[in-house]
Image: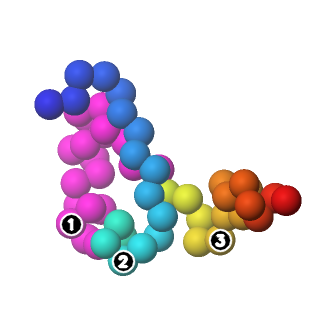
Amino acid sequence: MVKRHTFIVVNRAFIHTTDFIYDRLEEWKKRGLYIFEIPTYSPEFNLIEIL
């Protein structure tokens, strides 16, 4: 049970992009659970890439 808005950040790995996940997105949003997908290549999210 989600008691407050919750955001989960995932990459584009196979396990995160299955139909199981996409089929449940609307249901999860109604419960306050949100999935945020980062782009395939995101150097701005990795501090070592900025240096």
- What residue did someone put label 3 on? 41
Question: Over which residues does the magenta segment extend?
Answer: 18-36
Q: Establish if 28 lies above or below 44.
A: above
Q: Which residue is at the far bottom?
A: 14
Is residue 42 highlighted in magenta? no
Q: Which mark is residue 4?
A: none
Q: Nearer the viewer, residue 46 or 15?
A: 46
Comparing 11 with 32, the one in front is 11
Q: Is residue 7 above or below residue 49?
A: above
- Callout 3: helix, strand or loop? loop
Q: CA distance from mark 1 to mark 2?
A: 11 Å
- Mark 2 burial class by Cα count in 10 Å: few <14, some 14-19, many 20+: few
Measuring 65% from the left and 71% from the top, which residue is drawn there?
41
Q: Which residue is mark 1?
A: 20
> CA gap, disc 3 to disc 1?
24 Å
Asked whether the residues under the numbered discs 3 and 2 touch, taking CB atoms below 8 Å apart as contact, a structural biologist would say no
Q: Give the residue type at disc 1.
A: Phe
Q: Are marks 1 and 2 in contact (CB under 8 Å)?
A: no
The amino acid sitting under disc 2 is: Phe
Q: Which mark is residue 14?
A: 2
Q: Main secondary structure of the magenta part?
A: helix
Magenta run includes residue 20: yes
Q: Residues within 10 Å of mark 3 (few under 14, many from 20)?
A: few
Place of residue 44 in the rendered image (x, y in percent of width and height, measured from the top left): 73, 56
Could you tell me residue 20's position as x and y percent? 21, 66
Q: Residue at x 42, y 73 (%)?
A: 13
